[in-house]
Every structure is written in structure tokens, then in C-alpha cells.
Image: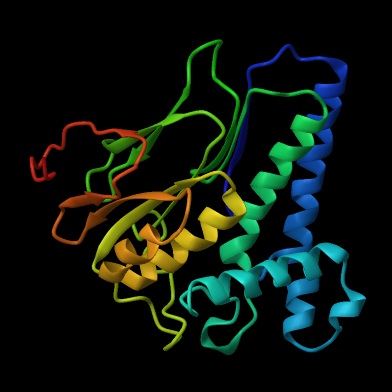
């Protein structure tokens, strides 16, 4: 999927958990083979070219496209698996894959885990007894610094922006890079499948994202604007670190 995955497991490494971790890694490689838009022979590439039908593809393809349709409706089209007219569900696939990986480990008895795919994270349980997980969110314009820290249990954290990959998020209405007034936006919820796709949509929305996010139950956000200021929703579960520019609102 063009990124690095990491696993932080805080439970006793039983044989069942070790086996589940091996299966999870194998499955993630399979997800890449099926959904990569960079592999001409992947099922999603062949489906996009009309060489196969949805019935010819694995069941996971049907599930992902159904989830994409749901996200498209919920975001009023700001999330789309077909920006520019080309089938590309990768805006949802990574979050879905990370959450599924977390579920595989949980079924094997891993209760306290962090699965991280390129900075999008699904957390379960705690990092230590009585101690919540803490996730640093990179500052989009100050390399090596954090804009905030998310702290909690059983959370999903997803960030969208241009700092790492440039203007790769498209405006689904035009097919061109989104002209967002945000540098980055981080969404926090329970399920990474949802918040990863919603973070992509929120970034494309720009300044209108805050009102939309307020309408989502159980979801909070932290954003850095192009003016290097920050805003966050009322329930954002963060510990707000100091900014080197001193421009965060109080």
C-alpha cells in the first residue's frame, strides 16, 4: 500500500498471538495485491479497466466498494472512490485494512494493541495497565515537531494533509488537487475504516469541515490551517503541546 505498517502488542506473546501476527502480515500483503492501483494486474486495476466484473473479484472488493458508497453518501460526495472518473478506493482501503488487522489480532487474544499504517492508527486496550495510549500527531509545517497528542483507549486516529505526500487529495468535483485551506486534519473515533475516509473528505472540505464533523456522533477533530493556526472540536481528547510559532488559540 505504499507505506510502512507496524504492530505494537502489549500482551504476553502466546503461540496463538504469534500465529495471528503472521497471518495478519500475510493478509495485508494480499490486500496490496488485490487493491493496489499501481499494480496493473490487481483486481481493482482490472475492474477499473473493465476486464473483470465485480462478481469475478474477491468478496473483499465488494465489501470495500460498499463501504466507499456509504462514505460517499455520508460526506455528500466529498469522499469518492472515483475522483476524476477513475476507480480508486485507496482512500478507504488502508483504514479498513488496519482495522481488520487489529480485529484478527484481537480474536487471537491480543487485547492491548496498536496497529499503525503510515500514521493512521487503530488502538485497542491500553499501552500498560491503567495507562492509556498516547499518539503524537506530526506538525504539518514544522518537521520533527508535534502539533498535538491524542490520548485514550480503544481509539482510531487518522490524519490527512499534504505534508508527507504533497497535494495528493483530490477534489471529487473537479478531479484536481483539493484547494483546501487546511494543512492537516486529524480525526479521532472508534473505527479506522470510517475516520480514515472521513479525514480525507474533511481535508477536501476545508473550512466547512468543522460544522460537518460536529454532526458526526463520537468523532472529534484537530486541524492546522494554512495560516498555521489550529482549531479543534469541543470533545477532542488531546493534550495540546506548545507550538513553536506560538499561534495556537488558547
x and y, in percent, of residue 112 in the image: 64, 23
The chosen color scheme is rainbow
In the rendered image, residue 172, in percent from the top left (x then y), is placed at 47, 82
Is residue 41 something that shows in the picture?
no
Total number of numbered discs in the rendering? 0
Looking at the image, the residue that sits furthest to the right is 56
- Placement of the N terminus among the 4 image quadrants: bottom right
In this view, the residue in front, 209 or 182, is 209
Question: 177 or 206: nearer the eye?
Answer: 206
Q: Residue at x 66, y 45 (%)?
A: 99
Which residue is found at the position 11% from the left and 40% from the top?
A: 250
The answer to which of 164 and 248 lies nearer the viewer is 248
Q: Is residue 88 left or right of residue 200?
A: right
Q: Is residue 2 left or right of residue 229?
A: right
Image location (x, y in percent) of residue 228: 16, 53
Quick check: 248 left or right of 98? left
Q: Is residue 118 above or below residue 67?
A: above
Quadrant of the image occupied by residue 18: top right
Q: Residue at x 84, y 87 (%)?
A: 51
- Residue 223 is situated, as x and y percent measured from the top left of the image, at 29, 53
Q: Quadrant of residue 163?
A: bottom left
User: Taking the image as drawn, is residue 26 in sight?
Assistant: yes
**Is residue 39 left or right of 192 when viewed as pictured?**
right
Q: Quadrant of residue 46?
A: bottom right
Q: Is residue 119 above or below residue 132?
A: below
Amino acid at each position: 500500500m505504499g507505506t510502512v505498517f507496524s504492530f505494537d502488542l502489549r500482551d504476553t506473546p502466546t503461540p496463538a498471538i504469534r500465529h495471528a501476527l503472521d497471518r495478519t502480515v500475510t493478509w495485508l500483503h494480499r490486500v496490496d495485491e488485490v487493491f493496489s492501483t499501481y499494480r496493473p494486474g490487481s483486481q481493482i486495476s482490472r475492474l477499473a479497466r473493465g476486464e473483470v466484473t465485480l462478481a469475478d473479484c474477491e468478496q473483499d472488493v465488494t465489501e470495500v466498494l460498499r463501504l466507499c458508497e456509504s462514505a460517499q453518501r455520508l460526506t455528500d460526495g466529498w469522499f469518492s472512490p472515483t475522483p476524476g472518473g477513475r476507480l480508486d478506493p485507496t482512500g478507504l482501503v488502508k483504514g479498513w485494512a488496519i482495522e481488520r488487522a487489529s480485529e484478527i489480532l484481537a480474536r487471537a487474544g491480543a487485547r492491548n494493541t496498536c496497529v499503525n499504517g503510515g500514521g493512521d492508527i487503530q488502538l485497542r486496550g491500553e499501552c500498560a495497565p491503567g495507562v492509556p495510549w498516547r499518539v503524537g500527531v506530526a506538525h504539518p509545517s514544522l518537521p520533527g515537531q508535534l502539533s498535538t497528542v491524542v490520548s485514550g483507549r480503544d481509539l482510531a486516529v487518522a490524519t490527512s494533509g499534504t505534508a508527507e505526500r504533497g497535494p495528493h487529495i483530490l477534489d471529487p468535483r473537479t478531479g484536481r488537487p483539493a484547494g483546501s485551506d487546511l494543512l492537516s486534519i486529524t480525526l479521532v473515533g472508534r473505527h479506522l475504516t470510517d475516520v480514515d475516509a472521513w479525514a480525507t473528505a474533511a481535508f477536501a472540505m476545508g473550512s466547512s469541515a468543522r460544522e460537518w464533523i460536529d454532526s458526526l456522533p463520537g468523532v472529534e477533530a484537530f486541524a492546522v490551517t494554512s495560516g498555521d493556526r489550529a482549531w479543534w472540536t469541543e470533545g477532542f481528547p488531546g493534550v495540546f503541546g506548545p507550538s513553536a510559532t506560538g499561534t495556537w488559540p488558547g
